[in-house]
Amino acid sequence: MKMERKKRKYFCLFVLPGFVGITAFVLLPFLDVAKRSFTTAVTGEFNGVKNYQSIFQNQAFLLAVKNTVRFTLVCIPILVGAGLVMALMLSSLKKKGFIKSLCLFPLAMPTATVVMVWKLVFYKQGFLNLLLTRLGQWTGLYGEVHMDYLGTGAAFQVLVASYVWKNMGYTMILWLAGLSGISAQMIEAARVDGAGGWQRLWRIVLPNLRGSLFTIVILSFLNSFKIYREAYLTAGAYPDKSIYLLQHLFNNWFVNLELDKMAAAAVCTGGVLMGAILLLQRLWEGSE
């Protein structure tokens, strides 16, 4: 009994600094934002749910929500699936240190450098159009290409490619960590029993990667909201409507001092994010 009290004491002492930090810098500011979402921006007078009614009638907000949800639903399956495929291929190699470092290199690159690379590749006179033009002239199938990838609907595909390219290495490393935790004896026993490669993958490897899958999906989900830096630096505060995200909207509301709308939208976004994470956790626990 005394040992249990001692363990609880040390546990509380260990958790206390983090809990105080989260309370002071996350929970209390969010509660203040929630309070401001029910007041006017200038006078601070209580106005009920008018701010929430205003944002749900705002076409820019609805467009930003649509694009953000679309971006998340497209990117996460691509990133998770491609990362798993690369990890499975890489796990069979003995010397993979250099390849792992190479895949992690985009994550270490400064955002400004990434943006400069994408601009050089995808603007009207960029390398991609130059390559396509030379290819068309060589084959005689078409002439010069001057497509504005960042100013048209193609900007969405560019943003998706940027997100996947930047986060692929990190996702692959997480998958490799999960694969390294699977017992080699179990896989070898299945091989001896006559299980083929696909059977071993489906019956042994994938079931043992459920914990890694949960972690990777959550991190990929949160990282999908950080792509705003690339989108903003590449196309500005008012990009093509296909990549106008919630972060663009928040930035524009902040510049225009529409803090009441921004507070209401932040509360809605925070609630949706928390609900999505809890749902994923419930689904993961239910599958065990």
Image (cartoon, rainbow, N blue to C red):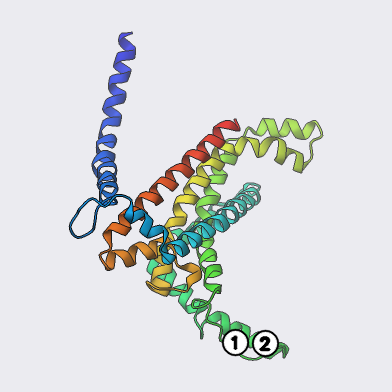
Looking at the rendering, which quadrant does residue 178 occupy? top right
Structural crowding at the residue carrying mark 1, measured as other residues with C-alpha within 10 Å and reported as few (<14), some (14–19) or many (≥20): some
Instruction: Please indicate whether residue 187 sits to the left or right of residue 148 in the image.
Output: right
At 40% from the left edge and 73% from the top edge, which residue is drawn? 238
In the picture, residue 20 is in which quadrant? Answer: top left
Q: Is residue 108 visible?
A: no
Q: Is residue 92 above or below residue 247?
A: above
Question: Where, quadrant-wise, is the N terminus in this rendering?
Answer: top left
Q: Which mark is residue 145?
A: 1
Q: Residue reaching furthest right?
A: 194
| Contact flag, marks 1 and 2 (Cβ < 8 Å) | yes
In the image, which disc is placed on residue 57? none
The residue closer to the viewer here, 229 or 43, is 43
Badge 2 crowding class, 10 Å Cα cut-off, few under 14, some 14 to 19, many 20 or more, is some
**Which type of secondary structure does the marked residue at label 2 adopt?**
helix
Q: Position of residue 22 (x, y in %)?
A: 29, 40
Residue displayed at 29% across by 23% down: 10
Which residue is drawn at the image coordinates 25% and 34% (left, top)?
Answer: 17
Q: Secondary structure at mark 1?
A: loop
Q: Residue at x 49, y 78 (%)?
A: 151
Left or right of 23, for residue 119: right
Q: Percent x, y for residue 75?
A: 55, 57
In the displayed image of the protein, which residue is found farthest to the left? Answer: 43
Mark 1 vs mark 2: in front: 1
Residue 181 is drawn in which quadrant? top right
Nearer to us in this view, 115 or 264 = 264
Mark 2, residue position: 136
Q: CA distance from mark 1 to mark 2?
A: 9 Å
x%, y% of residue 92? 66, 47
- Residue 119 in sight in this render: yes
Name the kind of residue labelled 1 in the image.
Val
